[in-house]
Amino acid sequence: MSKTPHGGTGLDYFALVEEARRLPGAALDRTVRLAVVAEFSTPHLLPLLRALAARAGVLLEIYQADYDSIEAEILDASSGLHAFAPRYVAVLPAAEKLKTRFYRAENRQDFAAQMVARFTWLWAAMNSGVTIIQGNFVQPSERAFGHFELKVPESMGAVVAAVNAGLAAAARAANNVLLCDVDHIAAEIGRASWADEALWSLAKLPCRLDHLPLLAQAVVGIVLAAEGRMIKCLALDLDNTLWGGVIGDDGLAGIALGEFDEGEAFVAFQHFLKDLKNRGIILAVVSKNDMANARLPFQKHPHMVLREDDVAVFIANWDNKADNLRRLQATLNIGFDAIAFIDDNPFERDLVRQFLPDVVVPELPEDPALYIRALNAAHLFETASYSQADRERPKQYRVEAQRELAKVAFTNIEDYLASLGMKIAVERFTPFQVPRIVQLMQRSNQFNLTTQRLGAGAVAALMHDAKCLPLTVTLSDKFGDYGLISVVILRLSEAEIEIESYLMSCRVLKRGVEDFVMNEIFTLAAARGAKRVVGRYLKTAKNAMVENFYQNFGFQKDYEWSNGDSTWSLAPAAYAPRPVFMADSRVTF
Amino acid sequence: MQQDEILARLTEIFRKTFDDDRLTVTHDMTAADVEAWDSLSHINLILAVERAFEIRLTTREVRAMKNVGDFVGLIAKKAA
């Protein structure tokens, strides 16, 4: 069975029920608390959620609300849901229930607005630290007006469309609400096949049982994305993946790319890839080719959509692809499970699956016209946020590759760091940084001491916490702007400063950022007359990189638990300040 | 399809659905005789039977079933 959420394509209902029965519990590396409140019956859904989360190494602890008790659970502060203290609440309505309300409604003009208000009211009643996953309504198949339906604003078809659009608009404005587009899932299957009216009347299930895994997968995919488990990079083959034919044999004019035959499919595929890049997915090339041949279409072919500056890391050689993917992973500093490998050649796909089981390797069909469909069907592209930083990320990784080249010119690292002209700023959280802070907390797995994942509401709350000093670090150098790359949350008391959260983007490893920040923490501790600075390391499957973080700064280990977690402390007088290489610094807190 | 054959295939389905390899179904068996047979697994059972015999049961048929014998009769009629 695949360890990744993406590798396992098995979405058979009974196979998942069976999988849920045999879940290993203890072997999973992370626990997530999810509450499910729905207008339909959920007991069949829950084992599917657990099994799919377990494939990604996540143990889901689920609070199951009673049937059709959304209002009771959310509005009553003493409900079981609130006592459960979930990190996520899935709010899943049912079209059948909406229909009943709609047919009984006296005023159909206001129906959609009231239905949207009903949910925004529920969102507001949840603690802002909870992330809500709001389902929408599946369009009913029946249409009293036939194709005239949408011309009548108070028809059911028009009302359901308005409710879904209203929920989406409201979710955009709310910072702790994610959408689960159930109507889209149903439409993909075909709404007539999705619906099972008999099963609704028999057991209050929202769809055919065979399709329930798709709903479960959507919810789990959203939770995993919010937990930082998402695809961050596509590693692309070239010949017969981005164009038809072999560039080394067929030459620039001989490859199929353009407005006729298969060429059109490759152009369409590249457009989709470019769209993914524009939304923050890093594109890399891993090709068996001579470098000059491999680059030629990117530079010279009139119908290439992707150009050299769309590709963050370009690897073309005759080594095996597993070795090249290892190089790619080392350059980007992301987990193997954040990389998807796209190759038309079944041999290469198998080889990568064999040697790098964590890399996600979707099947590709023979016909390039079906590449987009296949990639989309692999459900690789969930995300829980979208910001300016996403749009800039691919460029930043590209700039990073240039920095690596510049490094070669220096014989010692100090000279190199000094030559970068780094500018650093350490400051309190500001409101406009919140989306990026939330995103960095979601995405950082490796350089993350306590792996605390806060939603936008909780982050905003920290800004007004007098006992708290929540800090961001931004960095730039002569090659470009890294943006906001580190979050450090300090808890202040008279006697000590506790480092509650410390995480950093791996893109800025070995720049001395953490040295600079630690110097500042101890300067602050000395100025406050604190007796010690305290830190914790909470072990996860992914953060071994910072296991010795505190030890390296001279902290004493106060305690180590059997699960590998540890606590550390150091007195300000005993701290040896680190040399730093910042050309310019601004510290404001 | 012969009743014996249906019963044999049902036994297989029951064992999987209720996660119990020692189950053997009989005509007069009811939900009360199988510990794991509750309203939740009943729905799973119906889907498993529908899949295995390539039939669809109506709401009325599902509600009217009193024991395994009724199930067998329905399958014999519909999968004919």
Image (cartoon, rainbow, N blue to C red):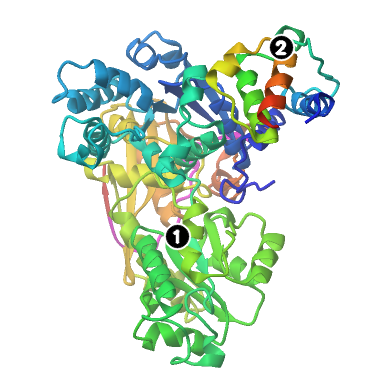
Amino acid type of the residue tagged 2 in the rendering: Asn
Q: Quadrant of the C terminus of chain A?
A: top left
Q: Position of residue A141 (x, y in %)?
A: 35, 35
- Up/down of A210 relative to A354, above or below: above
Labels 2 and 1 within one chain: no
Q: Viewer-proximal residue, A94 or A320?
A: A94
Quadrant of the rendered image containing residue A468:
top left
Name the residue beneath numbered marker 1. Answer: A507
Distance from label 2 to label 1 (Cα)?
64 Å
**Image mark 1: chain:** A
Can residue A506 be seen at all in this image of the molecule? yes
Where disc 2 sits, the SS reads loop
Name the residue beneath numbered marker 2. Answer: B67
Where disc 1 sits, the SS reads helix
Q: Viewer-proximal residue, A45 or A111?
A: A111
- Up/down of A367 relative to A223, above or below: below
Point out the stretch of residues depicted in magenta: A564-585
